[in-house]
Amino acid sequence: MKFLVLFSYLIFSDLKAIEPDEILDDYNLEKIAREIGKELRCLVCQNEDIQNSNADIAKDLRKVVRKKLTEGETKEQIIDFVHSKYGDFVLFKPPVRFDTLGLWLLPILFFFFLSLFFFRKR
Amino acid sequence: MKYLFTLIFLLFTFILYEGLKKDPRSIPSNLISKEIPEFSIKTFSNSDLSDFELKNDNVAIINFFASWCPPCRVEHKQLLKLSNDIPIYGIAKKNKKQDLSKWLNELGNPYKKIGMDETGLLSIEWGVYGIPETFIVGDGVVKYRHVGPVMRRDLETIKNIAKDLQ
C-alpha cells in the first residue's frame, strides 16, 4: 500500500498546483504547456516555477500559456511574450547577454581555479 | 598564487555582500520606455476603454487595483488627491461589480474610467504581478511604475514625473 501511494505520488506529482479545469483536452498541447510552465518563474514566490505554484499570478500565467497554445502559438513565442512583459526575472535560464555574461562564465572560471588549486603538483 | 586566491575570495565576498542589500522581491518593469500594450475592455459603466484613449491623454495614471485588496484601500486617499491634477484610469482586477460599487460609494471615486479585468489577462499584458501597481503613461509610453500602495511620501515623485511630461 505504501508503495502504491509513493508510486502514484511520483507519477502525479506533476499536478501539484494545477487544477482540473485548467488542463487542456489535447494531450500534446498540455505536455508543451507543462514544459513551458517549468521554464517560467513565479513572480511572487521566490524560485518556484509557475507549474508548481498556487499563487494567483502563477495560475493566471498558466491560463495565458494554455490560451495561447490553443490559439496556435509555439513554445518560443509564448516564452518570448511572458519574457517581454516580466523581464529576465521570469526566466529560470537568463539569456546570454553582455550584462548576464558573468552568470554564465563565473561558474566555469570558478571550477577552473578550484581544479587548479586542488590538482596542482606540489 | 596565494595572493590571487585571497583577492578572488575578497572579490566574491564583496559581490555577495553587495547582493545582500538588494531586495529580491522588487522586480524592475520591462515596459518602461515602451509603448503601452494594445487592449480593449469593458468598463464599470459598460462603456469601452482602450489603449487609444490613454494615448489621447498627455499624461495619465493607470492604477491596477481591486476592492478585495487591503493595500488598495490604503492608497485610495492619495489617489483622490492625485486625481485633481492627473487623470487616473483604474483597472479593477477580478472584481465583482457590486463589490466595486460598494467600495467606491464608501471611499469615493478618483477614476476617470474603470476597466473591468475579469480574467486578469490585461494585468499580465502590463506585466503586473501583484496589486496595487501604478503606471505613469506619457504620450502612450510607459514612463514609471510604482509597485505597492501609493503613500503620501510617493506623491512628490509621481507629481514631478507627471509635471515633466506635461
Image (spheres, grey):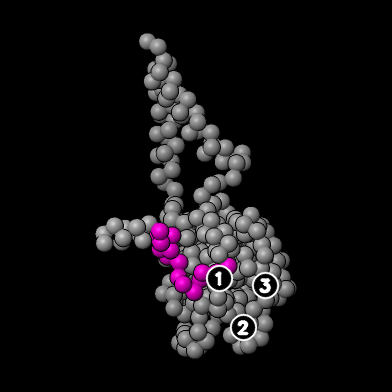
Image quarter of the N terminus of chain B: top left
Is label 3 on the same chain as label 2? yes
| Crowd around label 1: few <14 · some 14–19 · many ≥20 (10 Å) | few
**C-alpha span from label 3 to label 2:** 12 Å
For the C terminus of chain B, the image quarter is: bottom right
Left or right of A4, for residue B149: right
Which residue type does callout 2 highlight? Thr
**Residue B141 figure quarter:** bottom right
Residue bearing the label numbered 2: B43
For the residue labelled by badge 3, is the local secondary structure a helix, a strand or a loop? loop
Give the residue pinned by disc 3.
B39
Q: Which residues are magenta?
A: A11-26
**In 3D space, how far apart are the residues under numbered discs 3 and 1 (Cα atoms)?**
28 Å
Please tell me which residue lies in front, A64 or B23: A64
* Category of crowding for the residue at label 2, using alpha-carbon neighbours closer than 10 angstroms: few (below 14), some (14–19), many (at least 20): some
Label 3 crowd (10 A; few <14 / some 14-19 / many >=20): few
